[in-house]
Amino acid sequence: MKKSLIALAILSNFAHADEGMWMPQQLPQVAKELKAAGLKLDPTTLTKLTEFPMGAIVSLGGCSASFVSPQGLVATNHHCVYNSVAVNSTKERDLLANGFLAKTFAEELPAAPGSRIFVTSAVTNVSDKIITPEVAKLQGKARIDAIEKNQKQLVAACEKEAGFRCTVSSYYGGLEFYLIKQLEIRDVRLVHAPPAGVGKFGGDTDNWMWPRHTGDYGFYRAYVSKDGKAADFSKDNVPYQPKHVLKLAKDGLKEGDFVMALGYPGRTNRHRLPSEVAFTFDWNYPAFVKASGETLAIIARETKDNKDVALKYAGQVAGVNNYYKNRQGMLDSYAGSDFLARKTAEHEALKTWVNANPARKAEFAGDIEQVEKLIAERDADIKRDFFLGYAQPRLLNTARSLYRLANESTKADTERKSGYQSRDLPRLEAGITSVERTYDEKVDKALVLNSLTKYAAQPAAQRRASFDAAIGIKDGMSPADLAAALDKLYAGSKLGDKAERAAWLKRTPAEFQASQDSFIQAAVAMYPDSLKNEAEDEELAGKIQQSYANYMKAKIAFMKSKGQAVYPDANSTLRVTFGKVAGRDHGADGTTWTAFTTVNGVVAKATGEGEFNAPAKQLAAIKAKDFGKFVDPKLKTVPVDYLATLDITGGNSGSAALNSKGEFIGLAFDGTLDSIISDWDYNKANTRSIQVDLRYMLWNMKHIDHADNLLKEMGAE
């Protein structure tokens, strides 16, 4: 069989091999660089997904994690378990503030509804099964429909083995496709999370910043049925026994040491067109930052006098804050940079190379020109519908999903739209359940009104007529008029009731159409137009997929001609990145950044309140130098966080950081603010990831939280 383009793309000069989020199967191609960097393992072992250490690496469906005990104990970031802590918190038992530790299996709490642990078992190149010769001849929506049909057939065959979740992921803008098979563990339980004064120490003030003193760690446990199969939550379930677990490092890290991170990075955008860069940084990110700031202010205003409601929105606030600061940091890095100019010059050089050869011109030139026009059309649609995305009540979105499910359920399962098949029901049901602890009508109404006012101010031609009719929007309505329309809409619905929402999961389209519930009525009224809009979007997406894939094929060939490696952008699939523990000669403020922070910095920052409210017993232990065996010989105290030259992004949160022997040395959880633009424009000099040091985790667990049961389980005692 011919080599995949991914394999061909990396048979080149690896001058930049320390950059990149590598697919495991690519690692033999960078074996020389891995060995030179300090890896003591055979690089080929990292290609074997069911062997050590890759067999211990898991996904949480948005964060990364790893097995650290034979009893299914999973280590990840505090901010990855944060919503589960929040869901289990009340004003009488505030686990967010005080932390949580289960001393026994029986004390462990169910994680947030819909929580999953995914264990990857196989990755298979299925490009020729997705883009068949027949599909290659199709365009627009017909192409998208055919691709989706092929994906669903592969997924259905893969999921015949009960308990597994399979997906087909796209690489290089739709040029290649891989089938990912994962064990889907559905019974996930919260085991341990330190107090917010440790796990979220520094809060949003320190987020994306250095020096950092955050103990960003937490633990889940995976449960399965007694016969070892994936199962829904049950008191009869038993801890999952993974085939491989990570061994805790006995020796501490020092500056210059090899380090690698294994996880599931979300999205990077290093192969984007110049027009996509311009649209993102000139319009999309600024609009997002403004909307996020308003969201945070509204939630703060509406929840300030109600602790229980504030806890309901704690997870959303944490997520919005994270991306708010992330996007603003990217904008700050972009401002005054030559990124767009360089991107434009690179793109022009590609086109010159293509046009210099008749065969290349015939193969690539038309699609390169076409994709630029199609992207501009897509960006215009995004801009038009920006406020609409924020202006829909949460329960209206719930009603729309329920009505779509009712309609799709009338079809054979293989004919249903992806996202509404039988395999998707647990996710949909979990979404219905999660409303109970993450929703408040007063807060939701305030958020919607803010965006609805902006949406309604747009000319009618830029609005969606079906949405306007369903909500009762007319030209010239004042904010007071819009508020009155919302009051009527919310008052006419019973979807705020958990049992009522659950009942609609089983109802027919006819029952929806006969309903007098205001949100259900609005969903039914909007449905025909939503299908029409979806078809238009898919027509455009099909054209983009065809042209973008050929553009990427041209780019790979062009870069290969110059001896440059081409790794695929991150897409939430398993990746490996490697580098070393390293500070920076100069931080953004002109100061030197050391590679490690220590507990001395916790004391220096602690204020006793707000984001810097370190637990009193932790401060006392630091003052008493009660450090036990966790003292770094050079630092003379306990290290907290460390910098490394790892190429990570969102989704890498919770990734296991491993040393040269493949031993666990901490958890990746952040990057520095001036380097996060590397999602788009990798900067070798600036890029630094931030990891919580294993020694800080263990010291807190031993001396502060007395989590002796977990320490023994992990082999730390």
Image (tube, rainbow, N blue to C red):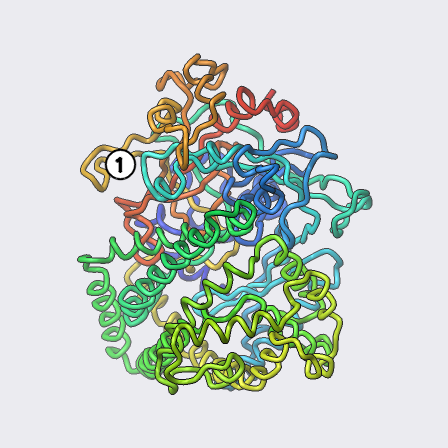
The three-letter code of the residue at mark 1 reads: Arg
Q: Residues within 10 Å of mark 1 (few under 14, many from 20)?
A: some
From the viewer's side, name the closer residue of 660 and 517.
517
Residue 546 in percent (x, y) is at: 44, 79
From the viewer's side, name the closer residue of 567 and 301.
301
Q: Quadrant of residue 379?
A: bottom left
Q: Quadrant of the N terminus?
A: bottom right
Say whether residue 658 is visible. no
From the viewer's side, name the closer residue of 279 and 595.
279
Residue lying at 52% horizontally and 47% vertically, measured from the top left:
306
Give the left or right position of residue 603, taking residue 178 as reference: left
Q: Of helix, strand and loop, which one carries label 1?
A: loop
Can you say whether 686 is above or below 172 in the image? above
Residue lying at 62% horizontally and 28% vertically, measured from the top left:
714
Say whether residue 236 is visible. yes
Can you say whether 633 is above or below 336 in the image? above
Q: Name the residue under label 1.
A: 584
Give the left or right position of residue 692, taking residue 501 as reference: left
Residue 194 in percent (x, y) is at: 53, 32
Residue 85 in percent (x, y) is at: 58, 42
Residue lying at 64% horizontally and 36% vertically, measured from the top left:
191
Residue 442 in percent (x, y) is at: 52, 60
